[in-house]
Amino acid sequence: MRKAQELPESAPVEPEAVGSEAPEPAGSEPTVPGAPEVDGVSTPATVLPTDARRRLKAALWPPRVSRGQLVVALLLFSLGLALAIQVRSTNDHSQLRGARQEDLVRILDELDSRQQRLQQEKAQLEQSLTQLENSSNQAKEAQEQTQKKATELGVLAGTVKATGPGIVLAVDDPQGQVKADMLLDTLQELRAAGAEAIQINDVRVVAGTYFTDASAGGVQIDGRTVSQPFRFTVVGNPQDLTPALNIPGGVVRTLEKQQARATITEQQKVVVDALADPKALQYAKPAAK
C-alpha cells in the first residue's frame, strides 16, 4: 500500500482580517475622506496636527516687538520726516532756481540793503541812548528825543504827512482782474522792501489797513472804494523798492499774468499827504512795566 505523497512544507498563511484595508504602497501620502478625485483617484491632502496649529498661532499672535525693532522703526520715521521737510523746503525755493543771474544778484543786493537799514536803525538808537546818558540837561534832551519819536510814529500811524525819496507805482487794469489779495501782496512787498509811508490813491495805508472785494466790482480799502488806475505813492529807498517789485514771480510778473500793466517811476521827492483818522482803542491799553 502506497503512502500518500507528502507535500513540501511552506510558510503558514494567515487569514485576511475581515474588513481590513489593503496596505498603502510605500511613498504614497495619506488621503482624507471627501478629498476631490481626479480620474477616479483621490488626491492626497496634508493634515496639520492640532498641536502644530496651536503652536503656529501662538508664534504669530500676539506680535512680539523687540527693543531693536522699535529703535529701527523710530529711526526710519525720523528719516522719513527729515526727507519730507527737505523736499518741501526745496519746493519753496523752486522759483529762485529758475531765476537769471542778474535777478539773483538783485535779490542779494536787496537783502544787503535791508541789513544795512537795520544796522543804521540800531546805530541811531544807540546814539540816542548815548546822548541821553551824557547830556548835561537830560530832561531837555529826553523831550527832544520824545518829540522826534512822536513825529516818526505819526508818520507810521498815518496822522502826519510824509515826504522824501521814493517811487510811484501805477497799476492799470483794463480787464478788471486785479483783486484785493493782489493789492495786499503789493503792499506787503513794499513794506518788506523798507517802505516808510504808503498811500493808495487817496487812502493812507496804516497798520490796520484792510482790503476787500466789493460786491459790485472793484476793490475797497478800509471800506472806501478805490477806482482804477491804482496809484501807490511810496516813501522809501528807490534802489530797494524797485527791485523788490521786479523779482521773478513778484508783483509785476503777477500783475502781467492778469493782463494788467504796472509802471514804476522813481522820484527824488514824493509826498504822502493823505491822513488816516485815528481810532479810539476799545480793548488795548498800555501795559505797565
Image (cartoon, grey):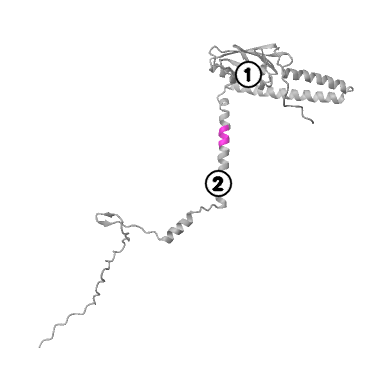
Rendered image: mark on residue 73: 2
Question: In the image, is residue 34 above or below residue 128?
Answer: below
Q: Which residues are magenta?
A: 84-88
Circle 2: residue type: Ala
**Does the stretch in magenta take in 11?**
no
Q: Quadrant of residue 268?
A: top right
Q: Quadrant of residue 273?
A: top right
Question: In the image, is residue 144 above or below residue 44?
Answer: above
> In this image, 34 relative to 61: left or right?
left
Depth check: give the residue in front, 85 or 57. 57
Depth check: give the residue in front, 199 or 246. 199
Local secondary structure at mark 1: helix
Rendered image: mark on residue 71: none
Name the chief secondary structure element in magenta: helix
For disc 1, the marked residue is 243
> In this image, 157 relative to 171: left or right?
right
Circle 1: residue type: Pro
